[in-house]
Amino acid sequence: MFHGFIPGSRASIMLDIVAVAMFVIVPVMAWSIMQAKKGRYALHGKVQLGLGIVLLVAVVLFEVDIRINGWRHLAAESRFYGSLVYPVLMVHLFFAVSTTVLWAWTIIAAMRRFPWPPAPNAYSPLHRKLGLLAAIDMTCTAVTGWTFYVLAFMC
């Protein structure tokens, strides 16, 4: 297995890619939401769909890597391995799974209920609420993921 590229980390390349991707995805997601607030609905839709596809591919590759190579042996040296690593991972997985479901629901429902090019309609209020929940959930996924990464692979 090849080790990652983040200095001071014992993580794999795929773990590093996902950690860095989350640093990119959260601000791009926030920027995209701002575009919708400015009435740039088509740009917002394209960016969100692009982020969804990128995340889907990254998560599939990540899961394949974890199933083949594992991660515990890389985290075993952490001083938090026997205490905080697993509880933080469980919290992270809660957010990661709920984000996947919520974001997929938000994107698929938007694709079904908005015309192209997108324009506000009767579905807009619910979409805003789902989008806000998905954005909060994604941010929690990123924060708990980074916390897990630091505790497991850098401490």
Image: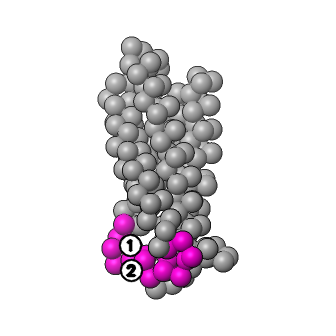
Colour mapping used in the image: one colour
Q: On the image, numbered disc 1 is attached to which residue?
A: 66
Q: Is residue 121 above or below residue 7?
A: above
Return the residue nearer the eye: 116 or 103: 103
* Amino acid tagged 2: Asn
Q: Is residue 15 above or below residue 115?
A: below
Q: Is residue 79 magenta?
A: yes
Question: Considering the image in quadrants, where does the C terminus appear?
Answer: bottom right
Residue at x 61% of width, y 31% of height: 35
**Residue 63: horizontal and vertical position, in percent?**
36, 66
Return the residue nearer the eye: 24 or 69: 69
Give the magenta part as a residue range: 63-81
Q: On the image, numbered disc 2 is attached to which residue?
A: 69
Residue at x 57% of width, y 33% of height: 33
The reply to whether residue 17 is visible in this rendering is: no
Within 10 Å of disc 2 (Cα), the crowding (few <14, some 14-19, many 20+) is: few
Residue at x 40% of width, y 22% of height: 126
* Amino acid tagged 1: Ile
Q: Secondary structure at mark 1?
A: helix
Q: In the rendered structure, find residue 75 and report the number of the disc placed on it.
A: none
The reply to whether residue 127 is visible in this rendering is: yes
Within 10 Å of disc 1 (Cα), the crowding (few <14, some 14-19, many 20+) is: some
Asked if disc 1 and disc 2 are in contact, CB closer than 8 Å, the reply is yes
Q: Secondary structure at mark 2?
A: helix
